[in-house]
Amino acid sequence: VGGVAFTGSTGEDYAQHWHNAIMLDTSDPMEIVGNLLYLQEHPELEENLRRNGPATARFYLWERVVETLRSKVRHLLLENNWPSGVGA
């Protein structure tokens, strides 16, 4: 199975801490070390991360990501009373 993803905790839609990724709160390398040591002590958690990561990635296909973005832009346009032809 795949690796373990480490991401910043900046609000990515796809990353869920301890479910499919490890989200880092700081730029301190010791945060990574601490998480790796924790995974070493909890192999079942590491296995779950390795299994859930690829399962999540299959859900985030480009077509789905682009359609979600289009929906958000469309909503913002309507909410702010932009002309209907903009962003169609």
Image: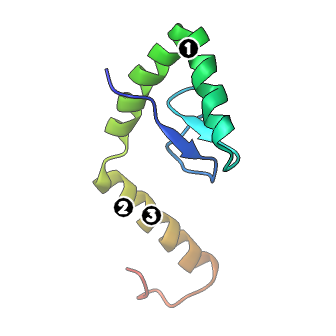
Residue visible at 63% across and 18% down?
38
Amino acid type of disc 3?
Answer: Leu
Q: Which residue is mark 1?
A: 40
Q: Earlier in the sequence, mark 3 or mark 1?
A: 1
Question: Secondary structure under badge 2?
Answer: helix
Mark number, residue 86: none
State left or right for residue 58 relative to residue 24. Answer: left
Distance between the alpha carbons at the discs numbered 3 and 2? 5 Å
Q: Earlier in the sequence, mark 1 or mark 2?
A: 1
Decide: marks 3, 1 in contact (CB < 8 A)?
no
Nearest the camera: 33 or 52? 33
Decide: marks 3, 2 in contact (CB < 8 A)?
yes
Amino acid type of disc 1?
Answer: Gln
- Is residue 23 shown above or below 82? above
Residue visible at 52% across and 9% down?
43
Decide: marks 1, 2 in contact (CB < 8 A)?
no
Query: Label 3 crowding class (10 Å Cα cut-off): few <14, some 14-19, many 20+?
Result: few
Residue visible at 61% across and 39% down?
23
Q: Which residue is mark 3?
A: 69
Quadrant of the snapshot with the C terminus: bottom left
Quadrant of the snapshot with the N terminus: top left
- Is residue 3 shown above or below 25? above
Count the labels in the image: 3
The picture places residue 9, in percent across and down from the top left corner, at 64, 47
Q: Nearer the viewer, mark 3 or mark 1?
A: 1
Q: Which residue is mark 2?
A: 66
Question: Secondary structure under badge 1?
Answer: helix
Amino acid type of disc 2?
Answer: Val
The picture places residue 31, in percent across and down from the top left corner, at 67, 36
The picture places residue 25, in percent across and down from the top left corner, at 70, 45
Query: Label 1 crowding class (10 Å Cα cut-off): few <14, some 14-19, many 20+?
Result: few
